[in-house]
Amino acid sequence: MRTTSSELLIEVDRSRPRGLRAQIEGQLRDAIRTGRLGAGTPLPATRTLATDLGVTRGVVVAAYDQLLAEGYLAARRGSATVVNATAATAATSPQPGPSVVDAVVDFRTALPDLSLFPRAAWLRATRAAMQSLPDEHLGYADPRGLPQLRTAVADYLGRVRGVTADADQVVICNGFGHGLSLLAPVLRAAGCELFATEDPGHQAPRAELDWLGVPHCGVPVDDDGVVVDRLRQSGARVVLVTPAHQYPTGAVLAPSRRQALVRWAAAVDGYVVEDDYDAEYRYGSHPVGAMQGLAPERVIYSGTLSKSLAPGLRLGWLVLPRPLVEPLATSRLRTDYATSSHLQATCAAFLANGDLDRHLRRTRRVYRQRRDVLIAALARWLPHATVDGVAAGLHVVVTLPPGLDEELLTEHAADAGVRVYPLGRYRRIARPGAPPALVLGYGSLSPRTIEEGIRRLADAAAAASETGGSDRPQTLVSRSGITSHH
């Protein structure tokens, strides 16, 4: 039997000609019809609601009885009166609209398989965190983050990514975009007006910089990563890079380029912002350490849980050179103050217990298998394509046969129920003559779905080839091998 009553917003006005019972009835009826009170919602006990509204209990009983008779409410002996499921469903069911045909296969990038989220381990970490979290950490805590999480992050990054930092240099944020929005004003205040981004590169940081009003330019990327000579010519003093697994090309920043990038930052009194977005996933080769370890005073390290766990957690971190810590913490105070203490405490327990390590070991096997399936499917259905970049992360770049238009292929693929992403859309500046290519994500797709998607993509490629003219390659589908660069 319930020992507490739900609270409910009902307003009564004794100056109205309409009676009190009718007012209560009408407001409850409207709340159920509009869906504000959903199916199964318990109503307050009649005595409790009467006290809250300052009316006699008989008025509330009469209102409930009328709504029970109309079928809006349901009641059982010994239980609370609740909103009738049938009435609520009828009131809130949307009217049927035109059907929308969605993609059968979406090779979306940067999305892990959310069904692999370690719910049981996360729940254990949540319970442990709530049992040990000091009361003061539920108040207005340090804007840099809870000390236990900053310590756990510093320890983890030092052990796994070779980051050189202590907990005082770590600032917890809500993902890379949020971290960049905090960081950019601090760097501009330090005199760094022009930022540079990789080209091709991720569109989201460019959009963030645009929103912040930060001037930025593009620097080309080749097989060895960002071209530092071109960066020197740009006039920028901050550059955003993805050195472990360039997004989207898959290139790894060569050791000589790393050293050159550090020398550039020192020469211009600037900073390298290292986006280490998916370095946890590397298949068949040794991990590449973070750039931050080469020059902690010039490299700002950024990491998140978006690829390793789930983007919906909205949890990440910055590792800052010491002179930037206090200005950024002050900036945080002026914006959103801090990340959820509850979430931080859970993450700290999750890291300290080794649960992230165990999750990564398990998911690496899954994603490696899916990448292998994708490579094999391309070999079977599109043998004239090549796969570029290091074997890592959750996506590949597929270079198409010369003459095949990537945008035209994208349209034909959509007609076939497959969503793919042309490499040209990641470029700031078009490169006439560059080979056509697609960026295909596989993290959220099952092996069977990957196979079906590539088969449909091959059909779309054949159709696009025919549509594009007789000078385009006609033999796109066969069962010979595929050239793959790892």
Image (tube, rainbow, N blue to C red):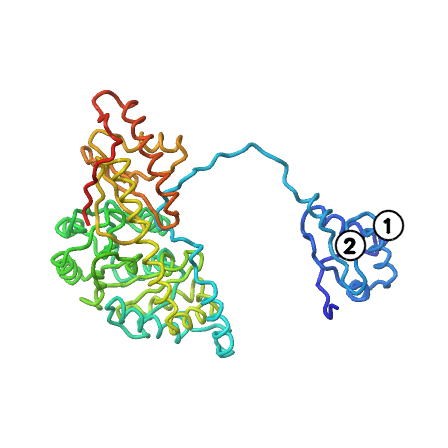
The answer to which of 58 and 418 lies nearer the viewer is 418
Mark 2 or mark 1, whichever is nearer to me: 2
In this rendering, position of residue 434 left or right of residue 214: left
Residue 332's disc number: none
Task: Residue 271: give x, y in percent of width and height.
Answer: 22, 61
Label 2: state its secondary structure: strand
* Disc 2 residue crowd, few under 14, some 14–19, many 20+, Cα 10 Å: many
Q: Residue at x 39, y 72 (%)?
A: 149
Q: Residue at x 23, y 37 (%)?
A: 385
In this rendering, position of residue 442 left or right of residue 266: right
Q: Quadrant of residue 108?
A: top left
- Residue that badge 2 annotates: 74
Tell me, yes or no, if residue 238 can be seen here.
Answer: no
The answer to which of 31 and 453 lies nearer the viewer is 453
The answer to which of 40 and 272 lies nearer the viewer is 40
- Residue that badge 1 annotates: 17
Of pointers 2 and 1, the one earlier in the residue sequence: 1
Could you tell me which quadrant the N terminus lies in? bottom right
Label 1: state its secondary structure: loop
Task: Residue 322: give x, y in percent of width and height.
Answer: 27, 71
Task: Residue 100: give x, y in percent of width and height.
Answer: 51, 34
The answer to which of 94 and 227 lies nearer the viewer is 94
Task: Residue 461: give x, y in percent of width and height.
Answer: 30, 30
Amino acid beneath label 2: Ala
